[in-house]
Amino acid sequence: MTPDAAESEPEVAEEWLKRADGLRVGSWIELSRDGTKVRCKLAAFIKATGKYIFVNRSGAKVAEYHRENLATAMAASEITLLDDGLIFDRALESIIDNLRSSRKD
């Protein structure tokens, strides 16, 4: 590889690569695209190809990234990691509210 070729490929900071490596199947993220935000979760990580596959709440594929591309998107704030605990708490609260309102009927 020539020095010019190495300079043309932006290098991703090690911190972001570690964050990408830290994602586990089931982790929720918020993906910013074209001014909209989409919540999706990591459905699969394919070690052989290094691909991360994200799906929406319905299970439809939303995005697919390789490790370096994922790290770059995270560094550019295109992808935000969501706190799984907060998501679970909100979902549980919603279920409890729905149960309470159904008992009143």
Image (cartoon, helix red, strand yellow):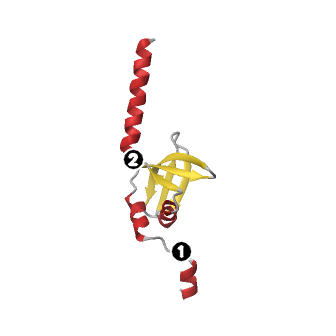
Q: Residue at x 42, y 66 (%)?
A: 17
40 relative to 16, above or below: above
Secondary structure at badge 1 equals loop
Query: Could you tell me the amino acid type at mark 1?
Result: Pro
Tell me the residue that label 1 is attached to: 10
Q: Quadrant of residue 92?
A: top left
Q: Earlier in the sequence, mark 1 or mark 2?
A: 1
Residue at the spot x=43%, y=65% of the render?
16
Q: Which label is found at residue 55?
A: none
**Residue at image x 39%, y 65%?**
18
In this view, 15 is above or below 90: below
Picture residue at 39% right of the left edge, 30% below the top: 93
For residue 2, say whether it is visible.
no
User: Label 2 crowding class (10 Å Cα cut-off): few <14, some 14-19, many 20+?
Assistant: few
Furthest residue toward right: 34
Q: Is residue 92 above or below residue 55?
A: above
Q: Which residue is mark 2?
A: 83
Label 1 CA crowd tier, 10 Å (few <14, some 14–19, many 20+): few
Residue 62 appears in the figure: yes
Query: Which amino acid type corresponds to the residue marked 2 in the rendered image?
Result: Asp
